[in-house]
Amino acid sequence: MGSSSLSHRNGKSSEKSLMYYKPQARKHAFLILYQWDMKGENIENLTEEYISANRITSQDQRRYMRKIVKTFTEHAVEIDKLIAELSEKWDIDRVGFIERNVLRAALAELLYVAPKTPKLVVSDYVKIAQKYAGKKCATFVNGILGHVLREKLGIED
């Protein structure tokens, strides 16, 4: 395999794959949380079924995706409370399924995983919101996450 391949034969990730696994892991974490929210099934089982059904073979993606999902489940009450507070006092159930679960994944990662590049994390989740629900959703998600960057993490836009 050439140097532009996504993984080496020895199973170690190449530099190129390291650049791309987190955005994909974020998308997968969102989709798992979305399915969980819709179906109400056991999240660990749902995660494993999702990995299998979507043939996610990257160990890096699987590990980071699981980390985001697990972090959300450990802090679900605090995260949902924050979403409700920042959504102009809307009850969490009034926030749309896509917005709610993009924010759940994003806040789990931003507040509890402590990524090195929080602005990039926000950008990735805004792109996910745009892809799955359009510009209005992306604007809402960007507003909430921008507030969290400024007020909770002390990072200016």
Image (cartoon, rainbow, N blue to C red):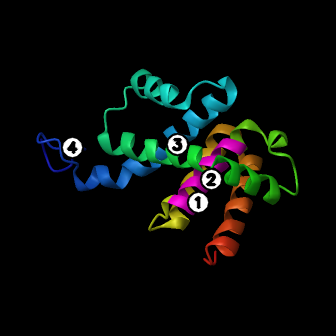
Whichever of callouts 4 and 2 sits on the residue coming sooner in the sequence is 4
Q: Over which residues does the magenta segment extend? A: 100-112
Q: Kindly report which numbered mark, 4 or 3, lies closer to the viewer in this rendering.
A: 3
Is residue 112 found left or right of 48 in the rendered image? right
Query: Which residue is tagged 4?
Result: 7
Q: Position of residue 121 (x, y in %)?
A: 53, 59
Which label's residue is closer to the chain start, 4 or 3? Answer: 4
Q: Which residue is mark 2?
A: 126
Real-space Cα distance between discs 1 and 3? 17 Å
Q: Are marks 4 and 2 in contact (CB under 8 Å)?
A: no
Task: Give, as a three-letter code, the residue at label 2.
Answer: Val
Residue at 87% x, 50% y is: 90
Residue 24 visible to the viewer: no
In three-dimensional space, the C-alpha distance between marks 1 and 4, rounded to whole angstroms, equals 27 Å
18 left or right of 90?
Answer: left
Give the spatial CA distance, label 4 vs label 3: 25 Å
Q: Nearer the viewer, residue 53 or 137?
A: 53
Circle 3 is placed at which residue position?
A: 69
Alpha carbons under labels 3 and 2: distance apart: 18 Å
Q: Which mark is residue 122?
A: 1
Q: Earlier in the sequence, mark 3 or mark 2?
A: 3
Residue 34, how many percent across, how many down? 63, 34
Neighbour tally class for label 2: few under 14, some 14-19, many 20 plus, Cα within 10 Å: many
